[in-house]
Amino acid sequence: MHLYLLRHAIAAERSPRWTGHDAERPLTKKGSKKMERIAAFIKEQDLSFDLILASPFRRARQTAEIVADTLSCRDRLLFSHNLKIGGSRRALISEITTKHRSKRAILLVGHEPYLGALISRLISGEDRTPIALRKGGLCSLRVASLRYGRCATLDWLLAPAHMVRRKGKA
């Protein structure tokens, strides 16, 4: 199995002007445009997913929808409360192994520090390995048998700058 982990794109900042619930903070225009370019990179790399599982928080939902639309796989997009801020990583692993065990390539879309701690848990067996995904960052893990503990090998971890070409640059 391959697990891919994607942090949501740039979202509206929490500030005194933001009066809504944190779960409803949307992507900014810049965040949406950057995620469209990251999704195009994912497509160019011929990555495909049997399942896209995302946090229901608006910014993660929007990020997952951009990827699903770019890859023409909106029908493979589901949402899990286990991926939201404060969700249970152990329950997420249980959800995947019980409900989605036949899937060979799964994209998880969520938040930091949740995703970094999940990567740490799966590659080292502990949550203490300091791993952080930048907004729009993408990670690939190879997993022989998924469990809540050391079970994965880190294939790669990319910052958005690795996936998005800047205008005027090759």
Image (spheres, rainbow, N blue to C red):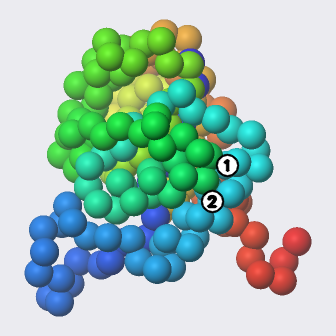
Q: Residue 119, position in %: x, y? A: 45, 35
Q: Quadrant of the C terminus?
A: bottom right
Is disc 1 surrounded by few (<14), some (14 to 19) or many (20+) residues within 10 Å? Answer: some
What quarter of the picture does the N terminus occupy?
Answer: top right
> Is 142 or 105 nearer to us in this picture?
105
Residue position for label 1: 42
In the picture, measured across the screen, residue 42 lies left or right of residue 111, that is right
Q: Which picture quadrant has residue 38?
A: bottom right
Q: Is residue 152 above or below residue 13?
A: above
| Contact between labelled residues 2 and 1, with CB atoms less than 8 Å apart | yes
Q: Amino acid at mark 2?
A: Ile
Identified at 51% across, 57% down, the residue is 66
Say the numbered circle drawn on residue 38: 2
Instruction: For mark 1, give the secondary structure.
Output: helix
Q: Is residue 58 left or right of residue 161?
A: left
**Horizontal and vertical percent for residue 104?**
56, 19
**Above/below status of 3 relative to 57:** above
